[in-house]
Image (cartoon, coloured by chain):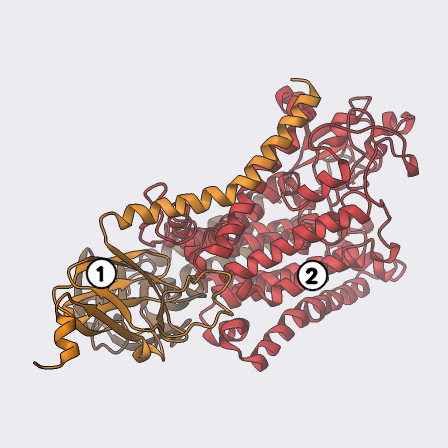
Chain colours: A orange, B red, C brown
Amino acid sequence: MRIKAKEILAIVVVTVTLLGLPFFVYLYDQTVIARRIQGADRVIELTGVHNVGVWTDQNVNGWNYWWQDIKPLPPLEINRGEEVLILLRSADVTHSFSIPQLKLGPVVVEAGHLEELRFTADRSGEFRYLCYRVCGVHHKDMKGELRVKGEGDEEADDLGGL
Amino acid sequence: MNGAAIPRIDLFAKFPWLKKLAKMRSLQFLLVFPNLVIFIFFFIAGIFGSPVGNSNIIITFIWILWWFLLITIMVPFLGRIWCTLCPLPFFGEWMQRGALIKVRSGEMAGGLRNRLYGLNKRWPKKLTNIWSQNFLFLCLATICAPLVTRPIVTVIVLGGLMIAAAVLALIYRMRTFCMYLCPVSGFLSLYSMTAMTGFRAKDLKVCQECKVKSCIRGSEEGWACPWFVYMGKLDRNNYCGLCTECVKSCPNDNITLYARPFSVDMNLKGYDEAFKAFIMLALAVVYSITLLGPWGIVKDWANVSEVGNLAGFGLYALAVWGLSLGIVPGLHSTATWFSRRWASAKEIPWKDYFLRFAYPLVPLGLIAWIAFSIPLIMINGAYILSTLSDPLGRGWDLFGTANVRWSPLFPGAVGYLQAGVLFLGLYFSVKATLKLAGEIFPEKGRVVVGALPHLLLQLVITILLLKFFIG
Amino acid sequence: MKRSLYKAVFLATAVVLAGGMISPAAAADRPVKSFLIEARQYAFDPPVIRVNRGDEVHIRLVSKDVTHGFYLEGHDIDAEVIPERETFHLKQNGKEQEVEEIVFVADKTGKFRYRCSHTCGYLHPFMMGEMIVSPNYLYKGTVAAVILLSGGMVLGRLFRRRKKEGVPP
């Protein structure tokens, strides 16, 4: 191949590869998540962060871990009867996710791994999820509320004990 | 000097395919570009992947795999081969040359026979040494704990170097960034002196009679040496980046790759180089104590971004800079003083004597780093396998090895390997000391007596390293 | 110069091997050494423990903050230590069980590092301590070897006879 052709080919390869690389990585990541999600009606992604003691739904990565303000979540809301998938990650140390009142977990979540908890809530109400593996000084704060909304129970709740 | 006294083999004569490879116009591109793609991927992983180092490919592949390969295999055998492959100057050189593969020839100021974009300024004379690199490397060593464990810090540092390389390429001549600023280049230049290969001119008379001097001025066949080297005078590996442009452009086919024994370039030409030797030796000790030691307090001090103990960090930083710029040079100065006295060598200027006997710390330092890197790869190597399959720590499993459980590789052998390697290190530094003394003292008695203080220092350093690693 | 190299290597190997051939003490009179090792981010406390060859070593493990691991080089021991628990999970000689302490005989000499084997944060790969089992033949042998090496090389230089006059060294 003549040198000029080689040069042009090189420029094309460089441009296509460097511009395409971030997209390929993003697309592949999405397919990995999609494969895990299969069949679930509702997906919740939670990441455990030990230095503030929070399960968060924010994306915690190498860039934002050190500066992002991570706050506890408002209550998670799911519906009774739907298949829920909670994808669990840890941003730093080993945590463990558990919803003891629904007899779910504990699922041990190690840093750098993606764990999952797949379930269908069979009763409505308000439940607690928490971290079941001591993970530092803020371990006891790592909890939150899960609200399961049931069909038909709403009226009963509103009317209050009829 | 690499004259006829040193046995060497002409590798281009022995392996003609090697010469063909070196003459290929597209060689550098084919080596550097895949490396660049991997680099950019690492950046993506560092920014968007897990914040935990051993789950992120940027940490495991750079600070465990690359570091081990560099210091244990690339440098002792192939010298500055990393500079041939390095992706940091890719964008800068592309903009400067206006080409990825071809050569743009023409006439330019300074007798250059290529056309380059950019301002092509000369780096300030006062900075044409490796002091800036010494300084930058010490800065990196001060933040070594966050650097080798937190992906984002590696992204910022390496990204910063890449940007600096690009900016400098547009302002200054050729590979000024690589020559005078890159911290990696700093220690590669020193340790490549020990390497068992290197480019040299075959026949210096041919160079003397050459009218075009294409190696340093460039031609239609090749770019002017980006490292400012005139092959007719190249007698050490230090500042040759093995880019192969001279092999392509020499009209007399006078450049070849020689193989030679370990540790033969023994000529240190300035205090900046001697201090690089002191810094690297001191840092081998500091890194070993901090990262491979059992003392949590030192790790806490170094880990300032997580622990926040500023006073402790100050102590740690003081140890890094004090050991490198004060204690180790001080020990060498003391040994030099006694050596010069005992051998009655007052007629030899202090500087020449100091630099001459600083060289043996080069093979010793390199081997101390190899001893440090052995447990790095054998113990922490399992993380390489897991991050290969899950580079971002987000639940991928590309090759099925994502859930490989951490387990060291033959940990029982590590101590024996370190002992063997340090034994060799002392062998080479003693050999060099005796040879260097023999070059200036004709009497055997003076050789031994003059070498003795340096030998004692090298022996003490070796025993200290042994005590730390296997004692 | 080469002859002194061989001499040093031979002597060192002899010292190391000789140390290896001394048989350990019989089970009845084996001294017992107990240690409580606390794991925290990112170190073990005590960082260094010293025992003699043949000692029966007992190690209790506690974690002060997060889940850590305990892997002892050279011995088939890997434990997982969870905070606020009396027992920990131990893998030893192919068996897995919940124990209160690790028990083993220190029959090999030298320096064995114990490392954290469970990701516990940023500096996890560098979290380690040392167990030194005396007498440390590898260390002593190598020190002897390097001293002999340098001495031998100096003597070799002193008594070297040149083959030809005027040949550069």
Location of residue B122 in the rendering, given as x and y in whole percent from the top left corner: 86, 49
Q: Is residue A71 left or right of residue B263?
A: left
Towards the viewer: B410 or B264: B410
Location of residue A7 in the rendering, given as x and y in whole percent from the top left corner: 68, 27
Residues under numbered marks 2 and 1 in contact, where contact means CB atoms less than 8 Å apart:
no
Q: Residue at x 83, y 31 (%)?
A: B218
Measured Cα–Cα span from mark 2 to mark 1: 45 Å
Q: Chain of mark 2?
A: B
Quarter-of-image position of residue B4: top right
Q: Is residue C5 above or below residue A61?
A: above
**Badge 2 amino acid:** Leu
**Badge 1 amino acid:** Lys
Q: Residue at x 71, y 58 (%)?
A: B276
Q: Nearer the viewer, mark 2 or mark 1?
A: 2
Q: Residue at x 29, y 45 (%)?
A: A35
Query: Can residue A90 be seen from the camera position used here?
Result: yes
Location of residue B142 in the rendering, given as x and y in whole percent from the top left corner: 61, 67
Which labelled disc corresponds to residue C91?
A: 1
Which labelled disc corresponds to residue C33?
A: none
- The kind of secondary structure element at disc 2 is helix
Q: Is residue C25 left or right of residue C10?
A: left
Q: Is residue B73 left or right of residue A133?
A: right
Towards the viewer: C159 or A44: A44
Q: Residue at x 63, y 60 (%)?
A: B281
The residue wearing badge 2 is B136
